[in-house]
Amino acid sequence: MRKEINRISEVGKALISVEGNPGVALNHVVELLEAGTNQSLSFAKAINITEDSTRFQVFNGTQGLSTQTKIRMHEVPLTAGFSYNMLGRSFDGIGDVADGGPEIIFEKQISTRLDTLNPTVRLVPKQPLWTGIPMIDVFNTLVKSQKIPIFAGPTEPYNRLLSQIAQGAQADVIIFAGIGLKFDEYHYFKEQLSQSGNIDKTIMFTHLAGDSQIKGLMLPDVALSVSREFADQGKDVLVLLTDMTNWSNILRNVANYQDQIPSLQGYPGSLYSELAKRYEVAADIEGAGSITIIGATTLESLEDPVPDNTGYITEGQFFLDNGKLKLARSLSRLKQQVNDTTRDDHRPIMTVMASLLADAEKAYEAAEVGAANDTFSQKLLRYREDFIANMEEPFGEPIELEAALDKCWDILKRHFEPTETGLSKKLIEQYWN
């Protein structure tokens, strides 16, 4: 028989407590039942256990609960369903169907506890993951199993950028995990993916702004657990998380409900380890597939706790400013692992164009005070405008790497003579014309 507890000692904003330890372990799930009718009200997860009390996070919030609410002990860790029939469908933060379609018969139940992966099965990242965006593929190549954020102001189109990446990404499975989304943002993603033809290899986990905070808190764990199962079955998986600042704010709220001692800006002292636990799921797994994670992180300043901690965990960043992917502020620390095995002009043209853009920025600063009137500075200024409009612009039809490299040559030819680029004679003879 399943054990039941007939009295809750405390009901908070998102938590409930019972006296003593009823016999569950951390992350085990209990069901909440109405006292008189035994009707199921919600589920909760054990998050803190002491000799005196046990605390549970309630998935749907504590509204409507009382100290008379019953707790039924299921005594199992929180699990999520897994099936290939999930592809093309939408789910909520705890893995329930959320698109109005038919229920899914899952092939298996998987634990959502994100255990640390054994380092011995991690392979050195060495395979590119093409996105169809020249600013990424040419200048900051994404690598399978990489973990990298998109840093952006709250008003920047970072969700549109994630949608653009999803449309062009060459991955077997794309998992979109949205926390605190507006309703129109959710439908925008779905519509864009449907138009691109990638919807059939995409699974959406969404938490809308008005949904239970606990569902938002659980969503990355559910999405990443499903991702790991696909990777274990040999699939290359791309996970798109947005917005990790929203998720961190929920974490802060829940920590405050638990009366944890706050750290900087009220975030819990465990913020770094909580973020790292999710990002470290990214891996290229020996004998299996890979998981690559891109996490949108909104910020007012790079010194804010969430982007500051994220920068120490991840392997570079894509920086979105005024709707453009800025070359000077973006970095993929793993690009050198793969961009020497592509076309022979990839590394040279990447280096030369970045160097010319740095010179162009100096010319732009000089032009603001009336200098930079010489012929070459004027070339640099025109090159800068062209580069921002055609290379730092991330939106449009996805294009292959070869076409992106040809586009780089076209930009150079519009503004410079061959000898002004610094490219080798061999490459000039091969690609200039």
Image (cartoon, rainbow, N blue to C red):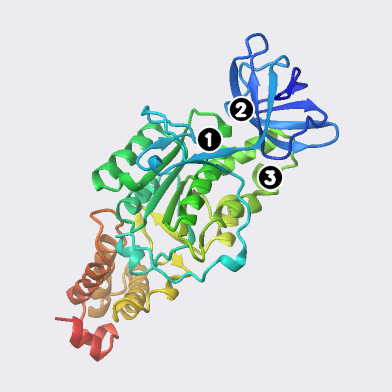
The quadrant in which the N terminus is found is: top right
Q: Given the current orientation, which residue lies at the most extreme right position?
A: 51
| Residue at position x 53%, y 44% in the image | 220
Residue type at numbered disc 2: Phe
Q: Earlier in the sequence, mark 1 or mark 2?
A: 2
x, y (%) of residue 353? Answer: 31, 75
CA separation in Å, label 1 and label 2: 10 Å
> Total label count?
3
CA separation in Å, label 3 and label 1: 23 Å
Q: Given the current orientation, which residue lies at the most extreme top position?
A: 36
x, y (%) of residue 259? Answer: 74, 35
Circle 3: is it few (<14), some (14-19), or many (20+) Cα within 10 Å? many
Determine the secondary structure under disc 2.
strand
Q: Given the current orientation, which residue lies at the most extreme bottom position?
A: 425
Label 2: which residue? 43
Q: Nearer the viewer, mark 2 or mark 3?
A: 2
Q: Is residue 117 left or right of residue 179?
A: right
Label 3: which residue? 268
| Residue at position x 44%, y 58% in the image | 234
Q: Nearer the viewer, residue 20 or 308?
A: 20
Q: Nearer the viewer, residue 265 or 349?
A: 349
Q: Is residue 35 left or right of residue 321?
A: right
Indicate the quadrant where residue 419 lies: bottom left
Judge whether residue 139 can be spotted in this image.
Answer: yes
Residue 344 versus residue 157 in the image, above or below: below
Label 1: which residue? 94
Asked whether disc 1 touches disc 2, contact meaning CB atoms under 8 Å apart, the reply is yes
Residue type at numbered disc 3: Pro
Circle 1: is it few (<14), some (14-19), or many (20+) Cα within 10 Å? many
Q: Earlier in the sequence, mark 3 or mark 1?
A: 1
